[in-house]
Image: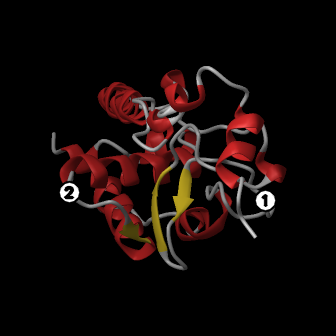
Amino acid sequence: MRRAQLLNLRHQRTLKVADEVWIATALLHRENPTRSDFEVREIVARAATEAGGRNLRPGVRVHALLHCVANRPANPGRYRMLYATGRLTRRLYRPGDPYHPSREGSKTIPRREEIPADYHELLDWYEREIGKMRREETQEDPILGLRGLGKEVWADEHPDAYVQRLREGWE
């Protein structure tokens, strides 16, 4: 069976539209690793491909535009599954991304038990990739690494006394 046929009518009734949008976006990210974001129309088209020929639910587009977007006010959807990088461009939400306060505590990824088993690998991929990004982000910042550099210059005197001494003779 083609992957696009996995979201059949049985899954349509149980799969949340937000999860469908997340799956489509995750597939785009995985298939296009050099791209940082995608246009909403691309996400909707990818969701349609995964739908396997059935009519796409009308909520998919509005979820990609608004309901799933972490850095937009909740209206009424509160999900934090996507992040708006532009007016009509989105990427997957990453832990640590800023988000609108009205979305505090909301769902960021699908629950494994709520999506078809064939998509569980996407959750694993996301955890690996986001974990990798988070590890890279926690590496020491080169600018912050300069903190304390040169402190030996005034090691024998109080910093205020050092500055005062440097300023002696200024007019």
Name which residue lies at 52% across and 21% down: 113
Q: Specify whether 36 is left or right of 90.
A: left
Circle 1: residue type: Ala
Q: Determine whether 26 is above or below 48 in the image.
A: above
Residue 35 percent location from the top left of the image:
26, 61
List the residue tagged with mark 2: 34
Name which residue lies at 46% across and 37% down: 146
Cα separation, mark 2 vs mark 1, equals 30 Å
The residue lying toward the viewer, choosing from 68 and 7, is 68
Q: Residue furthest front?
A: 169
Residue 135 percent location from the top left of the image:
39, 27
List the residue tagged with mark 1: 74
Q: Specify whether 76 is left or right of 127.
A: right
Task: Give the crowd class for mark 2: few <14, some 14-19, many >=20 residues within 10 Å.
Answer: few
Name which residue lies at 53% across and 70% down: 61
Residue 14 percent location from the top left of the image:
56, 38
